[in-house]
Image (cartoon, rainbow, N blue to C red):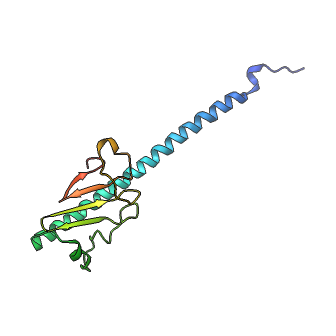
Amino acid sequence: MLRYSRSAAGFTLVEITVAVAIVGILAGLAITQGLKALERAKQAKAMDDMGDMAKYIAVRLSILGVYPNPLTIRSCPTCAWVPYERKDPWGHLYVYSGGGDTYTLTCLGRDGAPSAGITFATRDAFDLDIVMKDGQFVNQPFTR
C-alpha cells in the first residue's frame, strides 16, 4: 500500500491564494507606474513642442520687431508652428496669447481645460497647465 507524506501533496489553497494576491498587487503597482510614466512622457513632449514654437516666435520677433499677435498668427498660411493649428500630446490645441512685447503659450494638460499652473508639489497632477511666458517656462512639471 502506498502512503503519501503531507509535504509531497502540493500547495494548499491558502498558499495559492496568497501567491495570486501578491502577483495581483505587483501587477497593479506596475500598471500604475507605467501609466504615470506615459503621462510624464506626454508632458515632456508638450514642453518640447512649446520650446520649438518659442524658437519660431523668436524668429518672428527678429523679423517684425514685436511678438506676433494672435490675429496675425491665424492669418499666416505658411506658419507650421502656429499654436492654433498644433495639438498637444493629449489632442488639445495650444493656447497663444499676447503680441507686442510679451506673449504667453499654454498647454492645457490632460483635461484640456484652463487650470492652475504646475508646482513642484502638484507635478503629478496631469490636468494642470504648462505655461511659457516670453520663451521661459513659468509653470512646468520638471526641469528639462
Q: x, y (%) of residue 30?
A: 50, 42
Depicted 130 relative to depicted 21: above or below: below
- In this orientation, which residue lies closer to the viewer: 123 or 23? 123
Task: State which quarter of the image contains the N terminus.
Answer: top right
- Residue sitting at 48 percent across and 44 percent down? 32
Depicted 109 relative to depicted 65: above or below: above
Q: How many marks?
A: 0
- Residue sitting at 26 percent across and 47 percent down? 143
Q: Is residue 70 left or right of residue 32?
A: left
Q: x, y (%) of residue 141?
A: 31, 48
Image quadrant in which you'd find residue 69: bottom left
- In this orientation, which residue lies closer to the viewer: 116 or 7? 116
- Residue sitting at 19 percent across and 59 percent down? 135
Depicted 36 relative to depicted 72: above or below: above
Q: x, y (%) of residue 36?
A: 43, 47
In the current view of this chain or complex, which residue is farthest to the left?
Answer: 65
- Residue sitting at 32 percent across and 55 percent down? 129
Q: Is residue 57 left or right of residue 26?
A: left
Q: x, y (%) of residue 72?
A: 21, 76
Image quadrant in which you'd find residue 55: bottom left
Q: Is residue 128 left or right of residue 6?
A: left
Image quadrant in which you'd find residue 121: top left
